[in-house]
Amino acid sequence: MLRDDAFAKQPGAMGKAVAPSALRPSTVAQHWQMRPTATMIRHAEATRKTAATAASARRTERRGEVAIYAPCSFRWVSMRKRFRPVHLGRDSTMSSMQNERRGFLKAMGLGAAAVAVGPQWNMLASAVAADDAAPLHVATNVYPWLTFYKRDNRDFNAELDAGLADIKKAGLDGVELFLGSPEVLEKQAELLKKHGLQARSFYVGPPMHDERSEQSIASVLASAEKAKELLNTQVIVINPQPQKNKTDAMLRHQAAALEQLGRRLHQMEITLAYHFHSVELENAAREFHHMLCNTEPQHLTLCYDAHWMFRGSGNSAVAVLDAVKLYGSRISEVHLRQSVDGVWTEAFGEGDIDYPAMVKLLREAGANPLLVLEQAVEAQSPKTLDAVAAHRRGAEYTRRLFAQPVG
């Protein structure tokens, strides 16, 4: 706390020495209206630093002893978190500034009415509002575009230039393409920059469960380095080559290979995120849990595909939320897809999965993941929208969903 005697020479409204802590919120605002701007700025800076320090202490406390459910032992245990939640959905610098400004206002004890009193407070409140109004970065995986184009007898890969133009028309900020060779990345980077699209993440699915993992690691590292250089890529989403009934030996090999790859990428300031489909959830989800129980959280995060968790668990909305409760702090990216009565919808919106509840759990876990639409269509899906219209609607819903307060 700031010491009251630091303000001993600051006259109050009646000309007496008085500390701000002794004043009501409205009186504080009147008090500052009478002081020179320079004095207000010095106090604001001191209070901002105090609020930032307090916020840091609270974050440290939250990273202390926590109770989590350990699926490997099927019990609740108390352990110290080893992983600081990843913040990729918004610019980390902006998030820090936003938290400090909020802390400053709270530290001063000013409500909305008090803030409205003076022009300096109005400027500060406007800055906070501007931070809150900053649009979320919403990207799309390439897979749904492949399905929409195929439905119209088109080839997205063959029409990549036009396809990226459509993604931009849909109001999206970026695209998650399949991670190719460094040479392929150079061509993709030219087109992405042409259309004003980012590539914060790439998707890859190499074999990691046998002796081929060594070559897979080398290949991913070479391409990831090029993606970082050309596009400032932050996340590599990996779905180790799916295969039914991998043996225990294969699972151990795969977890060790992912740990090795994740450690190398971490040194390059790139996050490795584990992706899954329904096959990894078979047999008590042994593959899914083994990868997360036997890797370091800072070396392997989770790309949470909510709908594959839903479908892979027998169309269970409960399972979707329970997995977030278990691994929420490790989620660095989410793939967003919705269905109605188990059938994929054309546009991301309301349906079988309770996404507002999922957003609430993510916030409680301190996660701020990349948001990637993966609203593909299947044979039973309705056919009322084209790819651009469907994704525009999905992007708008996503921004509302993740921006609104969740009580």
Image (cartoon, rainbow, N blue to C red):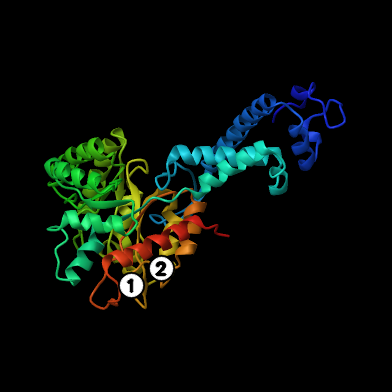
Q: Which residue is mark 1?
A: 345
The x and y percentages for residue 341 are: 37, 78
The outermost residue toward the front is 119
- Residue 248 appears in the figure: no
Foreground residue, 312 or 32? Answer: 32
Which residue is at a point 47% across and 40% down the rendered structure image? 94
Query: What kind of residue is marked 1?
Result: Thr
The answer to whether residue 332 is above or below residue 390 is above
* Front one among 137 and 133: 133
Tell me the number on the disc at residue 349.
Answer: 2
Q: Is residue 194 left or right of residue 119?
A: left
Q: Residue 206: image x %, image y %?
A: 17, 51
* Label number found at residue 269: none
- Above or below residue 356? Residue 123 is above
Name the residue located 78 percent from the left edge and 33 percent from the top edge: 31
Question: In front: 156, or 5?
Answer: 156
* Quadrant containing the C terminus in the rendered view: bottom right
Q: Residue furthest top?
A: 9
How crowded is the residue under tag 1: few (<14 C-alpha within 10 Å), some, or many (20+)?
many
Helix, strand or loop under label 1: loop
Whether 402 is drawn above or below 93: the answer is: below
Badge 2: how crowded within 10 Å, few (<14), some, or many (20+)?
A: many
Asked if the residue at tag 1 contacts the one at tag 2, i.e. Cβ–Cβ closer than 8 Å, the answer is: yes
Q: In what element is the residue under mark 2? A: loop
